[in-house]
Amino acid sequence: MPENTTALAPLINGGDHKDQQKESFHTVIAFFVFGTLIYATYSLIIAAAQDILAGTFIQTSMVLIADIGPYFLVTLIAPYFIQKISYFTRISTVFMSGIIGFLMLAFTEQVYWKLIGVGITSFGYGVGEVTFLALTSFYQQTTLCAYSAGTGTGFLIAPLYYTAMTTWACVSPNATILIMGTSLLLMFICYYAMDKKHLESSASSLTDAHNRRAYTALETKDDEPDFSTNEDDTRTDDCSLSYREKFMVIRQMLPNLMPMFIAWFSEYMIIQAVITTLAFSNAPFRPRDHYQYYIFVFLGGEVVGRSYLVTLSYIKAEWAEKAKFPYLWVLSIIEVSHLLFFILAAWFRFLPNVWIVLVLSFTGGATIGVFFVNALAFFSDTFEGRYQEFAMGYIVVAMGGGTFTAALIGLVTEPLLRRHCAILLKSDDYCFTRSKARERIMSHCPSKQH
């Protein structure tokens, strides 16, 4: 039908075209910092998961559920209405949620209060993820690459920082988390410094909408539009997509959201339910430190994967375009292969040492990083204008859904692998990468020894 053809056209051809001028350096840096802060906050919780649960046998996936549950709900619901909330208000929400969550992690003793603190933090970076991805739609693709590179950097910085502070520098986990919280102030500084194209675009859209209404008011009776066929397109805001348009975008995205769901499921099954049961007696570090190194190496691989396009784009723009890999299903299958290998290794314990786990942790991280940056590029190239703003904010639903599903299945998987390991090795000393008592976290430090 003609109406459907008209409705679908903007999905392909785009709506408002972005200024083709090169983005300013401080705007690109701002998006890089946004990505870094959101994912540093997120990965700090992942790196601290075993210390949050130290002294208990609570499944590691409980931290992941608290860390991803609110995030997933925000990313699932927020894209339908968040366009009505100013970007400054959203950024303030991210900041306050992070500060409150970190304070609860540092100053509460009971595990359930710590998990509530994780959940509050999760809500904040869920809002942040949707906000900053949507914000890239007002700028050139360089900002999207910068944001992606920032997320990879955040993934690396937080585990490195946490491992260095708690394992090498002998700083307590609570103090380490509090120090990290001060970095969230950078969000306000970067937002103040960046170009405000999103404000200019909103003002322009309102003016255009006003002009369109003024024109249609002069239409003759013969040319009167058929409102009965367009009731679904009625908007509460002239700058927002109708619900019908949003569902059209989601339907077009769905085939490529599925491999993203599967890839993120595999990643978080690996790091929160499988390698948490792999420790080696011949390793040069304690069982508790295995997890810190696994996370550091895995997320370090993500940095490499997420940063390769932005690196190439600054060397030569054509290289970045040619280096895009739109075959998302291939990357998803590679990540699933990593998961299956780690499950077999944890069940049969056939690996001779920790180094093979570390190498495969890096390649698994690199695969998910390459997936992430290519998924962003794919959806950015597919949609334009207001459709792109919604689509870029919605892709995190697949990531959140995959992660949350992994957390639920991990509640069963990790205890099963741990018990089987204890039977196989006739001891559970190397079947869990966690301190058996909270006070033993810092036991390797000279000042803690008697």
Image (cartoon, grey):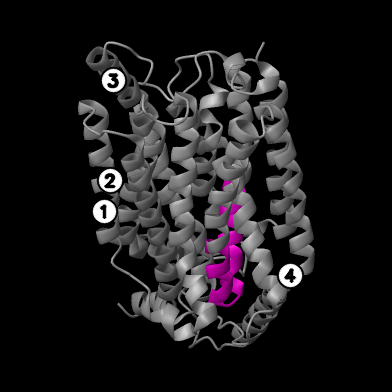
| Cα gap from disc 1 to disc 2, whole angstroms | 7 Å
Which image quarter: residue 5?
Answer: bottom left
Label 1 packing within 10 angstroms: few (<14), some (14-19), many (20+): some
| Between discs 3 and 4, the one toward the N terminus | 4
Element carrying mark 3: helix
Residue bearing the label numbered 2: 338
Type of amino acid at the residue the image marks with label 1: Ile
Q: Which of pointers 3 and 4 indicates the residue nearer the eye?
A: 3
| Residue 43 x, y percent position in the rendering | 55, 43
Quadrant containing the C terminus in the rendered view: top right
- Residue beneath the point at 66% across and 59% down: 33
Q: Nearer the viewer, residue 292 or 264?
A: 292
The quarter of the displayed image where residue 169 is located: top right
The residue beneath circle 1 is 334
Q: In the rendered image of this protein, does residue 429 appear above or below residue 243?
A: above
Q: Amino acid at mark 4?
A: Met
Q: Is residue 408 above or below residue 180?
A: above
Q: Is residue 405 visible?
A: no
Residue 371 screen position, x and y as percent: 38, 60
Contact (Cβ within 8 Å) of mark 1 with mark 2: yes
Query: Which residue is the site of mark 3?
Result: 416
Alpha carbon distance from label 3 to label 4 = 50 Å
Magenta segment boundaries in residue numbering: 125-148
